[in-house]
Amino acid sequence: MYPNQSSNLENSTRHLKRASAHYKLSNLPKEIGKLVSLEYLYLDSNQLNIRPKEICELTSLGTLYLGNNQLYSLPKGMSKLRFLKAFWIENNQLDGFPTEIRNLKTLEILKMNGG
């Protein structure tokens, strides 16, 4: 890697609009919270089992897929996602209706079943 190549990569990913990962992830890298321009995030069909709190820093997020994972709860900072319109959380290990969702004022689509 050349000098400054790492910082150039970081600067270019800050403006990323769409990201997808189907790699059997069990947790997310903390750096994902730096993708401040991200509007679409597809993390379905992984093995996420801890609250992905870094997602709460993605304040431009409009669509979030977390279905088909192993999540037991959602991060408490979900209300920061003030532009979230579509949220898929089906087929996880959630125990009842997550209270964090109640504060998502712009939410139009919520897909939640099977766990």
Image: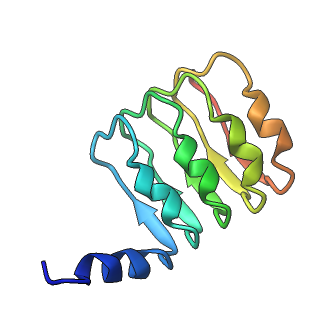
The residue shown at (44%, 49%) is 43
108 or 7: nearer the eye?
Answer: 7
Colour approach in the figure: rainbow
Say if 58 sits above or below 45 in the image.
below
Residue 91 horizontal/vertical position (percent): 52, 29
Q: Residue at x 40, y 59 (%)?
A: 20
Residue beneath the point at 84% across and 42% down: 103
Q: Quadrant of the C terminus?
A: top right
Horizontal side of 52 relative to 101 (left or right) equals: left
Image-quadrant location for residue 108? bottom right
Residue 34 percent across, percent down from the top left? 50, 63
Extreme-front residue of the structure: 3
Q: Is residue 63 above or below residue 52?
A: below
- Above or below, comparing residue 22 to residue 97 in the picture: below
Q: Nearer the viewer, residue 8 or 37?
A: 8
Query: How many marks do you count on the picture?
Result: 0
Q: Position of residue 7 (x, y in %)?
A: 33, 78
Q: Quadrant of residue 11 in the image?
A: bottom left
- Indicate left or right for 47 with 91 as reference: left
Percent x, y of residue 17 = 52, 74
Left or right: 76 with respect to 88?
Answer: right
